[in-house]
Structures are given as C-alpha cells and as structure tokens.
Image (cartoon, rainbow, N blue to C red):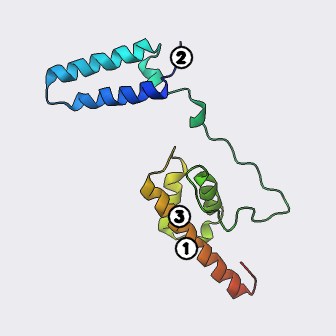
C-alpha cells in the first residue's frame, strides 16, 4: 500500500528525527522507535516517506508560446515565490544576456522544489541586471526595450 504523510505528520517526523542527534543513547533509541511508529501508524513505509506521492512535487509544463510572439516573457517577469520557475525559464531562453556565473546559478536552481530567501534575492538581482542589459542593447540597436 502506498500512502503519504500529512503535512502535520511530516513536521512531527522531522522533529522526532532531529532527536537522533542527541548525545544520549536512550533518547536516540526512543526517537528512532517513535519515528518508526509514526510512519507505520500513517500506513506508510519508509520508501513512501522518501518518495512521497504528492502532486505538488510534479512540475507542470509551461504552455508553448504563440508563434507570432517571438519573446513572450521578455524581459523576464520579476520572480515571485509562486512563479519563480517562469522567470528561470525565461532567463534560460535568453542565456546570451547572462554571464557564465548567472547561467550556472539559474541552471542550479532550475530543478529545485523551492528557493531559499537568499536564492530568491539573487534571482531577483539577476532579473534586474538582465533587464538593464536588454534595455541597453535595444538602445544601441536604436529600438525600444
């Protein structure tokens, strides 16, 4: 039977597993037993814990842009905590405007489930710099940004 833990159960399991670092062997033993009982009590196996069947872990593919719009997401949208993947995809589609370090960073966060606050700040800073580069290039070409 394949089940998954509820968010509350996952939080409780994380707290219990944190006790495995205790300096007291009895506390470690009790934490291990409590974790095992919590998983079993939820109708799960340890495989279910480490490979949860949760729909929000799966990425939904972005819709293809319309053929008449050559740069649908350009300049890239400012990232938000819920739509940062769209910003990453937009940046990767125009890697010619990114430095080698920026490409490496954006590729490294592309497969993450979520971003830390610092990663989010760096992504927002990259968007700002890329938008400036894009506007400067458009001015040099005599167009508008």
The residue shown at (49%, 54%) is 108
The relative height of residue 81 versus residue 54 in the rendered view (above or below) is below
The picture places residue 55, in percent across and down from the top left corner, at 60, 31
Seen as rendered, the residue at the extreme left is 24
Dot 2 lies on which element? Answer: loop
In the picture, measured across the screen, residue 136 lies left or right of residue 120, that is right
Mark closer to the observer (3, 2)? 3
Do residues under tags 1 and 2 come within 8 Å of each other at their CB atoms?
A: no
In the picture, measured across the screen, residue 60 lies left or right of residue 64, that is left
The relative height of residue 112 versus residue 1 in the rendered view (above or below) is below
Q: Which mark is residue 67?
A: none
Dot 1 lies on which element? Answer: helix
Q: Which mark is residue 2?
A: 2
Dot 3 lies on which element? Answer: helix
Residue ID for mark 1: 129
The picture places residue 96, in percent across and down from the top left corner, at 61, 70
Seen as rendered, the residue at the extreme right is 68
The relative height of residue 95 versus residue 86 in the rendered view (above or below) is below
The picture places residue 36, in percent across and down from the top left corner, at 34, 16
Residue ID for mark 3: 124
The residue shown at (42%, 58%) is 118
The residue shown at (43%, 24%) is 9
Q: Quadrant of the C terminus?
A: bottom right
Which of the two discs, 1 and 2, labels the residue nearer the N terminus? 2
């Amino acid at each position: 039977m394949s089940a998954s833990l509820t968010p509350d159960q996952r939080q409780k399991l994380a707290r219990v597993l944190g006790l495995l670092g205790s300096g007291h062997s009895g506390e470690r033993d009790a934490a291990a037993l409590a974790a095992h009982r919590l998983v079993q009590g939820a109708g799960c196996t340890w495989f279910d814990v480490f490979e949860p069947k949760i729909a929000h872990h799966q990425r939904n593919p972005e819709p293809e842009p319309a053929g008449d719009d050559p740069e649908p997401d350009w300049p890239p949208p400012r990232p938000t905590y819920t739509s940062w993947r769209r910003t990453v995809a937009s940046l990767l589609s125009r890697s010619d405007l990114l430095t080698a370090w920026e490409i490496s960073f954006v590729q490294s966060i592309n497969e993450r489930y979520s971003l830390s606050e610092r990663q989010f700040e760096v992504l927002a800073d990259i968007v700002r710099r890329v938008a400036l580069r894009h506007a400067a290039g458009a001015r040099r070409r005599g167009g508008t940004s």
